[in-house]
Image (spheres, grey):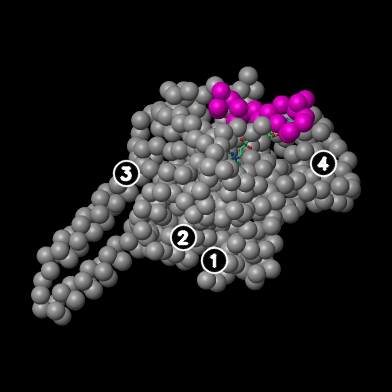
Amino acid sequence: MTPIETTAWAILAIGALGLIILGYRQFSTIRRDGDIFQGEIALLGERLEAVRAARSSSDKVTAPWNGTRKFQVVNKREEKGGIYSFYLAPHDGKLPLPPFQPGQFLTFQLTIDGKSVTRCYSLSDAPNPEQYRVSIKRCLGPRGKPEIPPGLASGWFHDSVKEADILDVRAPAGGFSIDPNGGSPIVLSGSGVGLTPVLSMMNALVALNSRREVWFFYGVRNGEENMIEETVKEWRALNMPNYHIHICYSDPSDSDKPGEDFDHHSRVSVDLFKTLLPSNNFDFYTCGPGPMMEAIRDGLSDWGVPEKNVHDEAFIAVKKSVDVTASSVEFRKAGKTIQVSGAATNLLDLASEEGVDIPSGCCAGSCGTCQVALLSGKVKYDSKPEFSVESGCCLPCVCLPDGDLVLDA
Ligand SMILES: Cc1cc2nc3c(=O)[nH]c(=O)nc-3n(C[C@H](O)[C@H](O)[C@H](O)COP(=O)(O)OP(=O)(O)OC[C@H]3O[C@@H](n4cnc5c(N)ncnc54)[C@H](O)[C@@H]3O)c2cc1C
């Protein structure tokens, strides 16, 4: 049984147990009162029916696929803030789609101008058995540097991908995710396009009518860039006392109304959490620009939040140079050997400087595209990569040599 199937069965088993307990409680209440409420029986019947339906749909859960699967763009929708959402249905028509954990991403194997390009995009909506959604922001070149080209894949998605196009997609993956059936209180915060994974988490909780305590923070410049204005209105209309939604505009425009369009004239920060949250006893999930995540991570640590409760994801890895002890790295297939010493960022950069092409994707240790076999020697990681590395292999995008090394690259 695959991990996803095991999880699906575990969720069903817990759900069924919960319903049995609920059913027992409801019937005991009914018996105690000596009065049978037709409404309660109907409700119980509906819930049992829901379990049966969930059970029968889980029987049909297809395992995540290996390699790439072809998906058709069934809808391309322009959002605010330079973002397009793409709705993807399997080209082979086989449904239901494998479920995913909200917060996970898809990896796209693209061919742009004849060049093979791999990019990851977070699933931005609740799990849906018929289609997936990703939301992609156009990545502009740095200001004042016209010689630097804008983002390749995001620009291609915006300008060239249209409805009915077919894309090669790898199965949902990634450890920055929640179990939507969990019960612990959580804080979800996203800034800019870093909203996407936490939007999927929030939508999943809302879809399940979750009673979990959820604090949701979205940071964006102003109303012109707020891609979830309508969604937030829908969440608020649910009047769920356990959902606390806070919209932060860092630079509101004159037409943005405080208290209506946004709640705070500020960025998302730990100082804001401290003024609003009843305690620090939450699991924190953050995605956004590097400096925001660094500030939140440091602030949560200063606030005494245990590291195990702090979860974040970077779309673009912050590269740190680390001093490496003198070692030789042989790229066996390329027939090249380099001597490494002093400051270095990662093995992928070292290979690229030497003209050794190792296919890569996220460059953040998440997608596994660059995984290569270690023929001899050891590597070291700054922190444990999110992707589960196969034994005898390494992820060059996030590791460095730990002594002499021979790679199957
Ligand atoms: C797990 C994960 C999830 C993600 N989810 C999302 C998501 O939901 N939505 C989303 O929009 N993005 C997401 N991303 C980011 C996405 O994968 C891409 O990194 C992003 O779209 C940029 O890719 P690109 O090909 O457009 O830009 P690239 O071509 O990779 O360029 C990136 C930047 O480098 C600059 N650049 C290009 N060439 C040079 C050069 N020679 N010198 C200096 N600078 C240069 C470009 O101007 C650009 O600013 C995610 C990333 C990860 C790892």
Image location (x, y in percent) of residue 97: 39, 40
Cα gap from disc 2 to disc 3, whole angstroms? 35 Å
Q: Which residue is mark 3?
A: 60
Left or right side of 365 for 324? right
- The three-letter code of the residue at mark 4 reads Val
- The three-letter code of the residue at mark 1 reads Leu
Q: Earlier in the sequence, mark 3 or mark 4?
A: 3
Image location (x, y in percent) of residue 105: 53, 43
Q: Earlier in the sequence, mark 2 or mark 3?
A: 3
In the image, what residue occupies the spot 71% across and 42% down? 397
Left or right side of 204 for 295? right
Q: Which mark is residue 244?
A: 2
Cα gap from disc 4 to disc 1, whole angstroms? 51 Å
Q: Which span of residues is magenta-colored?
A: 141-159
| Residue depth check, mark 3 versus mark 4: number of the one nearer the observer | 3
- Say whether marks 2 and 4 touch (CB < 8 Å): no
Cα gap from disc 2 to disc 4, whole angstroms? 52 Å
Q: Earlier in the sequence, mark 2 or mark 4?
A: 2
- SS category of the residue bearing label 2: strand
Q: Which mark is residue 329?
A: 4
Cα gap from disc 3 to disc 1, whole angstroms? 43 Å
Does the magenta-highlighted stretch encompass residue 361?
no
In which quadrant of the rendered image does the C terminus lie?
Answer: top right
- SS category of the residue bearing label 1: helix
